[in-house]
Amino acid sequence: MEAVARLRNVPTSPRKMRLLADLIRGMEVEQALNTLKFSTKHPSTPLEKLLLSAVANWRVKNEGVDVAEANLYVKTIFVDGGRVLKRMRPAPQGRAYRVRKRSNHVTLMVDSRNATTENANVENSNIQA
């Protein structure tokens, strides 16, 4: 059973966040946490907290199941653009340049590999029968 966690209005550009999201997509949770913990990129800290939140949400949905035995992995992660704050920066000769301070929304889903393989086995047995 999968669990979802969302992070809204992170004050980082979506492009920078997507670099990390692409890095951990499909990874085991432990490996993804280690990757984010030792990453030098700025958005790795909020993304690490989001991953821990998704694992906690999975734990609430699946009471009595051990997280270590479940082989959790990052099933889906995507980054959408959030609100854009428009600011003005002084420019030469009395002009002003527009600065767009971007933000993003991140959605992360974790699932256990055991559940997906069991579901696939059930579907295959239904097809063969």
Image (cartoon, grey):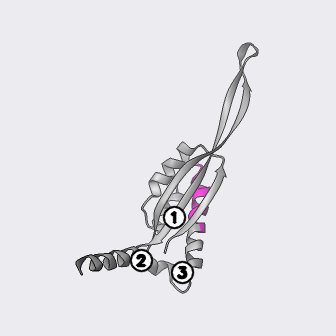
Q: Farthest residue to the right: give it.
A: 94
In the displayed structure, does residue 85 sit left or right of residue 44?
Answer: right
Q: Magenta segment range?
A: 42-53
Q: Is 96 drawn above or below residue 85 in the view shown?
A: above
* Circle 3 SS class: loop
* Circle 2 SS class: helix
Percent from the top left, x then y, of residue 23? 45, 54
Is 47 magenta? The answer is: yes
Q: Are marks 1 and 2 in contact (CB under 8 Å)?
A: no
Mark sitting earlier along the chain (1/3)? 3
For disc 2, the marked residue is: 115
Residue in the picture at 57% in, 54% down: 106
Is 69 magenta? The answer is: no
Q: Can residue 37 be spotted in the picture?
A: no
Residue in the picture at 59% in, 64% down: 5
Q: Judge the density around disc 2: few (<14), some (14-19), many (≥20) Cα neighbours within 10 Å.
A: some
Q: Amino acid at mark 1?
A: Met
Residue in the picture at 53% in, 61% down: 108
For disc 3, the marked residue is: 62
Front residue of this view, candidates 62 and 72:
62
The residues bearing labels 1 and 2 have C-alpha atoms spaced at a distance of: 14 Å
